[in-house]
Image: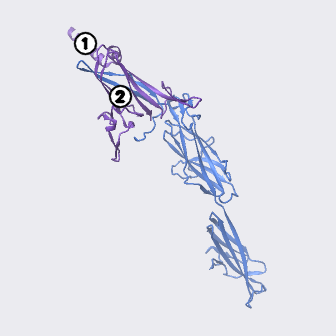
Chain colours: A blue, B purple
Amino acid sequence: MPAAASPAPAGIVIENTAEATYDDGGVTRTVTSNTVQVRVNELLAVAAASLDSGPLTVRAGPQVLSFLVSNSGNGPEAFALEVITAVAGNAFDAALDSIAVDSNGNGTYDPGVDAVLPAPSVTASLPAGGTQTLFVIVTVPEGVADGAQSAVTLVARSATGTGAAGTVFPSAGEGGADAVAGLSGGTATVTGQMVASASTISLVKWATVTNPFGGSTAAPGATITYGIRATVSGSATVDDLVINDAVPANTRYVANSLTLESAPLTDAAGDDAGEASAASIRVALGSVPSGTSRTVTFAVLIEE
Amino acid sequence: MNNCTKFGLAALLVAASAAAPVQAETAAPLELVGYVKLEKVTTDPSGERRVEWVEPQVVVPGDKLIFGTQFTNRSQAPIESFVVSNPVPPSVSVAQIDPAVLVSVDGGKTWAKLADLVIVEADGQRRAALPGDVTNIRWVLPAIAPGESGRLEFPVTVR
């Protein structure tokens, strides 16, 4: 196919003139026809697409979906935006916070930089063929199950008007010419997908008693070694996981007995992941990927 | 002085009859009338598709138009070596071309039948010319009898 030229701009006049030459007794004569003129009206057409490469993995809290709205008509046009979060088939519905435009054009939502569109959310006028990246910021509710899915629909409508294909909006187009709804009726609808990622943490604690006489009787003077294993399951990494445990009454913490994954930790705060005092122990595990576990141990002495 | 005036007037008359279209319509033996029609597709209640060609009122990209020229020989003598040239307006793309008609794909520098023309793309690739590449159309008629008329048309799509 020949190079796809951009559509004829709204408001231009297409003119056609034919010229004839003929022989008139040895003299070549030229005749020009009248010029016929056709004015191009404004076509209202819009396309919308999701810019996310697939379903967004989300957790409770704010999430950003990215969309592209394109003016596929032939005149400058603004588009009114509507976001629908309650979509049939959703396992959960997010709540709409705001719609923002990619003000700095970097394709990433920058809070405070990318301008939020106040309601009613209408884009700036986009030139024919122009596009606008949009961010839809939603809040995912607490308590969503791991793997639960949710769709968010963005609808973009020509600000001049929408209607069945061919609907004419008299004098509403560029330059005062009529505007005409294109095949999509001046409306575009696109859906972004989210899939919830949640994790559960299981803690298992056990105790081993050893007494100075080589047995396992929990008597004064015996040592109790506690083990705590945290296991993360689900699809998400858990961040900032911290294990706290109190030193039981009538026992005394055994100095420098704290370990993480069998490696000793000091009792002092700040020099490693662990800290211990007469009252309690604390180990900061940081980010723990799903499907892994961390084991902490410490020892106490049963007071006499 | 007097002679000069007469000469000047005569020269003006010749110029007017050759150049002014208004004058040409009444005085010239050949009449050319351009027109344009818009394709209007309707579907009747039984679902049958009907195509009408109407006076364009509202035209948007993608619409199909026919540009045409009606010629008439108003004189008592045959018109010979009749050639009609029509540059294709920008903003439209020729949809279909009579394979026998001469066309240009380079703004009128070279002419041939469409099937004999080749397009060299920006990347050097060569391909057969397509109707959408046509920039000029030329019809050549050996003769038009006195009183004879006809139409020369080409369908286009608004870009």
Task: Provide the secondary structure element on which disc 2 rests.
Answer: strand
Residue A107 pos. (x, y %): 52, 51
Q: Residue A247: which quarter of the image?
A: bottom right
- Looking at the image, residue B134 lies above or below residue A203: above
Residue A159 pos. (x, y %): 57, 36
Q: Foreground residue, A73 or A270?
A: A73
Residue located farthest toward the top when viewing the structure as drawn: B2
| Quadrant where the image shows the C terminus of chain A | bottom right
Instruction: Specify whether residue B71 is in view.
Output: no
Mark 1–mark 2 Cα distance, whole angstroms, equals 32 Å
**How would you rate the neighbour count of disc 2 (Cα within 10 Å): few for under 14, some for 14-19, many for 20 or more?**
many
Q: Residue B133: which quarter of the image?
A: top left
Type of amino acid at the residue the image marks with label 2: Asn
- Looking at the image, residue A284 lies above or below residue A64: below
Disc ID at residue B10? 1
Q: Residue A161: which quarter of the image?
A: top right
Residue A88 pos. (x, y %): 67, 48
Q: Which residue is mark 2?
A: B86
Pinpoint the chain carrying mark 2.
B
Q: Earlier in the sequence, mark 1 or mark 2?
A: 1
Type of amino acid at the residue the image marks with label 1: Ala
Pinpoint the chain carrying mark 1.
B
Residue in the image at 39% along x and 31% along y:
B89
Task: Provide the secondary structure element on which disc 1 rests.
Answer: helix
Nearer the observer, disc 1 or disc 2? 2
| Quadrant where the image shows the N terminus of chain A | top left
Q: Foreground residue, A6 or B112?
A: B112
Q: Foreground residue, A118 or B145?
A: B145
Instruction: Specify whether residue B76 is in view.
Output: yes
State how many labels appear.
2
Same chain for the residues under marks 1 and 2 in the image? yes
